[in-house]
């Protein structure tokens, strides 16, 4: 493609080192889409004849069909996806194929392809996040009243419902969806028209191409258009947050599955056994989600580092943006898809959750609040309850199991009505405000989340 300027062919090792076709073939569908929009614009502007346009359309359609059925002959000699497609087109349709590259460069071409690819990936990821959220909401609804211990410092703190806990996860993913939607707006801008770096001397119509490709706007400065990879970095940061959330959820699933917790069971299809220890049922899937989070963080750092020393405008360094980005998307898509199924498969052992909540003096704060309502300052109430907890510990029972006379020894304010607040149900029902764990509030949160998810699908994606 550029041999006119060179005295000798490129060294074989250099060819292998610089080629990107082993991975960037994945951009082919979008490269074709962008080429079609570009060619139509060139024809509109009178830069390309209608006949050439017709040939280009036919040639690209044939190539797209070959790619789809797996028979397209990708060539390392043709370096990257752009050269591979252009040469194949020229082999097919001759002259017109050579005219397609008028008023563009691979620099604005690859930036365009990558944005189209990523936009499509974001849409797929959003659909999967939605799936996970729906599964979480379904489980939360089934367990809006199921008591479990809530933890701080991984110590039993206060009772919550399992539904409330799952809705916390749902909330994390709602923010992820919001972040990705915002990121998509900056992905969805058109670099094409920047050509190599300075723009082109042809009378192009960038707005036409943007419209044809569904972009919301243009990359306004040609130098920035070909060199900006912020959109990929921003996406990787969003992806890292999604994986961080999935990893936290996975970690809790792993804990809950250990026989010591015994809060949940996963269906066998998500677990593996041990080749030596017959009793084992290992949570490989959540462990791998937790593990794969590392590679996604790694890709974010790789992309940031890739960009930090680059002068304007395009540099070959940028070719290194693809593999991290592709792997980030692949990892995220697989992890979300499997996590959605995993969530649906969770079987709750409600009696084990309740037992754990009833054992850790989880209603101690409720007793303190009770004393405050009877007029004691909170700090004093805290002190009184702490002493009562110690007494319960000494007797080897939960605070809620102390007898009235025993409790009254710590404060004369305590009366028989105390047991209404010391029970798990009493504690839950008392937290009856927006964001609280009262079953009524959990159901309200579920209704809000369902309404939000219904809204999210109504307007067509821009
Ligand atoms: N394969 C290249 C990449 O991925 C395409 C752009 C090449 N441009 C250039 N001037 N060498 O970045």
Image: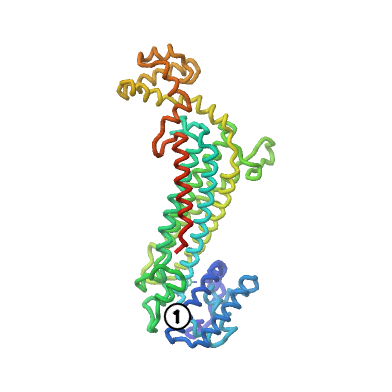
Quarter of the figure with the C terminus? bottom left
On the question of residue 358 being in view, the answer is: yes
Tell me where residue 356 appears, x and y as whole percent: 52, 28
Tell me where residue 211 appears, x and y as whole percent: 43, 72
- Name the image quarter holding residue 406: top left
Please say if 81 is above or below 177.
Answer: below
Please say if 261 is above or below 377.
Answer: below
Viewer-proximal residue among 194 and 457: 457
- Name the image quarter holding residue 181: bottom left
Viewer-proximal residue among 373 and 28: 373
Residue in view at x 65 percent, y 43 percent: 272
Residue identified by numbered label 1: 41
Viewer-proximal residue among 304 and 459: 459
Residue in view at x 49 percent, y 34 percent: 161
Please say if 374 is above or below 287.
Answer: above
Tell me where residue 28 appears, x and y as whole percent: 55, 71
Mark 1 surroundings: few (<14), some (14-19) or many (≥20) residues within 10 A: many
Q: What element carries label 1?
A: helix
Residue 111 in the figure: left or right of residue 375: right
Please say if 270 is above or below 354.
Answer: below
Residue in view at x 54 percent, y 27 percent: 355
């Amino acid at each position: 493609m550029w041999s006119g300027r060179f005295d000798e062919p490129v060294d074989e090792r250099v060819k292998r080192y610089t080629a990107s076709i082993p991975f960037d073939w994945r951009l082919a569908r979008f490269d074709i889409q962008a080429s079609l929009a570009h060619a139509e614009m060139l024809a509109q502007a009178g830069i390309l004849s209608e006949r050439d346009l017709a040939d280009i359309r036919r040639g690209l359609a044939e190539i797209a069909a070959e790619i789809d059925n797996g028979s397209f002959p990708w060539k390392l000699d043709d370096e990257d996806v752009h050269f591979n497609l252009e040469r194949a087109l020229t082999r097919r349709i001759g002259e017109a194929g050579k005219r397609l590259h008028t008023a563009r460069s691979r620099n604005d071409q690859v930036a365009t392809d990558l944005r189209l690819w990523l936009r499509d990936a974001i849409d797929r990821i959003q659909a999967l996040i939605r799936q996970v959220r729906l599964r979480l909401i379904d489980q939360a609804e089934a367990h809006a009243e199921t008591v479990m211990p809530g933890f701080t410092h991984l110590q039993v703190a206060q009772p919550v419902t399992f539904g409330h806990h799952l809705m916390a996860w749902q909330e994390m993913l709602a923010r992820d969806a919001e972040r990705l939607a915002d990121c998509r707006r900056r992905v969805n801008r058109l670099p094409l028209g920047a050509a190599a770096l300075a723009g082109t001397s042809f009378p192009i119509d960038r707005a036409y191409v943007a419209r044809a490709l569904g972009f919301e706007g243009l990359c306004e400065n040609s130098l920035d258009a070909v060199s900006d990879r912020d959109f990929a970095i921003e996406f990787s940061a969003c992806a890292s947050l999604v994986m961080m959330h999935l990893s936290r959820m996975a970690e809790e699933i792993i804990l809950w599955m250990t026989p010591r917790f015994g809060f949940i069971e996963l269906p066998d299809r998500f677990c593996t056994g041990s080749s030596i220890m017959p009793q084992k049922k290992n949570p490989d899937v959540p462990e791998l989600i937790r593990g794969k989070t590392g590679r996604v963080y790694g890709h974010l750092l790789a992309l940031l580092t890739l960009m930090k020393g680059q002068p304007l405008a395009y540099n070959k360094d940028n070719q290194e943006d693809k593999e991290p980005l592709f792997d980030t998307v692949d990892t995220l898509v697989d992890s979300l898809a499997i996590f959605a199924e995993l969530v649906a498969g969770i079987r709750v052992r409600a009696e084990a959750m309740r037992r754990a909540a009833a054992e850790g003096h989880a209603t101690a704060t409720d007793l303190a609040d009770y004393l405050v309502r009877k007029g004691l300052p909170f700090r004093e109430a805290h002190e009184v309850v702490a002493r009562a907890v110690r007494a319960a510990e000494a007797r080897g029972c939960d605070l809620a199991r102390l007898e009235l006379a025993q409790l009254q020894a710590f404060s004369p304010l305590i009366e028989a009505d105390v047991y209404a607040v010391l029970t798990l149900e009493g504690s839950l029902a008392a937290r009856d405000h927006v964001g609280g764990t009262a079953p009524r509030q959990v159901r309200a949160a579920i209704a809000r989340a369902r309404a939000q998810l219904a809204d999210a699908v109504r307007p067509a994606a821009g």
